[in-house]
Image (tube, rainbow, N blue to C red):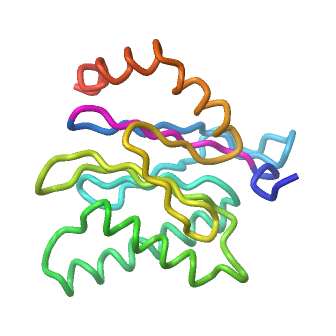
Amino acid sequence: MSIMSYTGGTVLAMAGDGCVCIATDLRMGEQMTTIATDVKKIHKIGDRIYVGLCGFYSDALTVKNQILYRKSLYELRENRKMRPQVAAEMISNMLYNKRFGGYITEPLVAGLDPLTNKPYICAMDTIGCIASPRDFVAVGTGQEYFLGVCEGKLFYIILVRELPLELE
């Protein structure tokens, strides 16, 4: 049994034509015990960047605070807004630096590039290995189920075509 299955949680992101959608559950629990049903797992990092963190809740909050701190430093030094690709690399480096006593959380980054308005989604494992597909990605204990649903052609075609309309 994986350590990620102990706390649970799943985050899903999909990229459409000039848009992204990120969704998650709100449950926090320990295996079969539900502790809370209103836990926020999606965090706004920038104007067009969102990070979904599932896994051990205290590690997820620590990672979120470190991301916000490093994002602020980046924007002060570079005098420009952070792009989603840069945020993903920053989070990956942060997780890899703690790989031997790492965080028990799997991040997912979803956002739009501020210059080109192109969608960017990626997922990482607990040591920061990035997987960045073009269309959809999921992390957490239910990722196999979400990926199976997203790979179904009918659901995928309907969602990608109607995603910009539903978000407006």
Q: Residue furthest bottom?
A: 77
Residue 14 falls within the magenta-colored stretch? yes
- Judged left or right of residue 26, residue 14 is left
Between 106 and 27, the one lying in front of the other is 106
Residue 79 falls within the magenta-colored stretch? no
- Judged left or right of residue 50, residue 36 is right
Which quadrant holds residue 67? bottom left
Residue drawn at x 23%, y 32% is 17
In the displayed structure, 14 sits above or below 114; it is above
x then y, percent, for residue 70: 37, 79
x then y, percent, for residue 31: 85, 45
Residue drawn at x 46%, y 12% is 154
Numbered range of the magenta stretch: 8-17
Residue drawn at x 71%, y 83% is 100
x then y, percent, for residue 4: 75, 54
Magenta part mainly helix, strand or loop?
A: strand
In the displayed structure, 161 sits above or below 53; it is above
Residue drawn at x 60%, y 58% is 106
x then y, percent, for residue 13: 45, 40
Between 44 and 98, the one lying in front of the other is 98
